[in-house]
Image: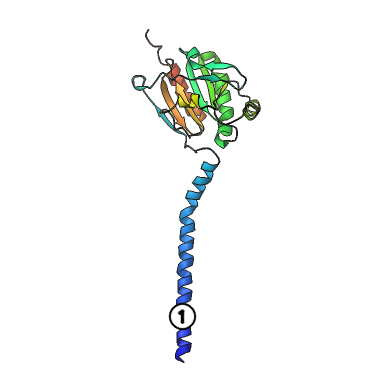
């Protein structure tokens, strides 16, 4: 009888330990869920920003930003040639989901503001020419993108936007200084409002 009681006790303790182990395992899985999801996003090659926007008054702006390179068509680009105009810089690459999502809005912005002294330029340090040009054709991108495989162009933005945040958008005033940044998918209405505000600023006094 005593042996039967002992066996029964061991059975109860075993089931209790198994239940505790299962609960711990489930808790670990729940705890790892968000972390694993974040790692998956990172492994896809982009850091998903939340579209947060920051602006600076004219007296507090960094710059001017010096950004130059060769685009995917082999043409030299230098934003210094656009001093006196507003410049919008956008980092992207073809396989980035938010880059694809915002591409039509950026193309529309470039077309709508082309006669108002606004220039757009992309920076892409990931894609080969074929992938980049296919993206540009698909979304009818009317502005150039610097092929930045050596990282020189993105280095010019260091301290302005997080290096791994793609897409990111930087609005430069007429002096080439940083007027605003958008980290992540840019809201088209917000971005246009920023561009309008910078356009409305009086030209710098020589």
Spot occupied by residue 128 in the image (x, y as percentages of width and height): 62, 29
Number of on-image labels: 1
The residue positioned 49% from the left and 61% from the top of the image is 26
Colour scheme of the rendered structure:
rainbow
Within 10 Å of the Cα at label 1, are there few (<14), some (14-19), or many (20+) other Cα atoms?
few
| Residue at the spot of label 1 | 10
Residue 172: which quarter of the image?
A: top left
The residue lying furthest to the top in this view is: 206
Spot occupied by residue 168 in the image (x, y as percentages of width and height): 49, 30
The residue positioned 46% from the left and 20% from the top of the image is 196
Helix, strand or loop for disc 1 = helix
The residue positioned 54% from the left and 24% from the top of the image is 122
The residue lying furthest to the bottom in this view is: 1
Pick the quarter of the image with the C terminus. Answer: top left
The residue lying furthest to the left in this view is: 59
Spot occupied by residue 127 in the image (x, y as percentages of width and height): 59, 30
Tell me: residue 10, above or below residue 80.
below
Instruction: Name the foreground residue: 90 vs 198.
Output: 90
Tell me: residue 19, above or below residue 66.
below
Left or right, 54 with reference to 153: left
């Amino acid at each position: 009888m005593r042996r039967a009681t002992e066996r029964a006790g061991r059975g109860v303790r075993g089931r209790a330990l198994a239940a505790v182990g299962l609960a711990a395992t489930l808790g670990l899985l729940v705890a790892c869920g968000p972390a694993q999801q974040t790692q998956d996003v990172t492994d896809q090659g982009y850091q998903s920003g939340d579209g947060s926007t920051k602006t600076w008054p004219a007296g507090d702006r960094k710059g001017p930003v010096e950004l130059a390179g060769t685009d995917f068509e082999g043409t030299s680009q230098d934003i210094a040639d656009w001093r006196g105009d507003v410049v919008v810089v956008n980092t992207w690459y073809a396989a980035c989901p938010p880059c694809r999502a915002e591409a039509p809005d950026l193309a529309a912005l470039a077309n709508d503001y082309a006669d108002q002294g606004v220039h757009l330029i992309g920076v892409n340090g990931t894609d080969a020419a074929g992938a980049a040009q296919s993206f540009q054709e698909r979304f009818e991108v009317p502005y150039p993108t610097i092929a930045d495989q050596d990282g020189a162009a993105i280095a010019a933005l260091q301290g302005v936007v997080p290096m791994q945040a793609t897409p990111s958008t930087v609005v430069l005033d007429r002096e080439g200084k940083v007027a605003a940044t958008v980290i992540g998918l840019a809201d088209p209405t917000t971005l246009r409002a920023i561009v309008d505000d910078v356009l409305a600023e009086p030209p710098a006094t020589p």
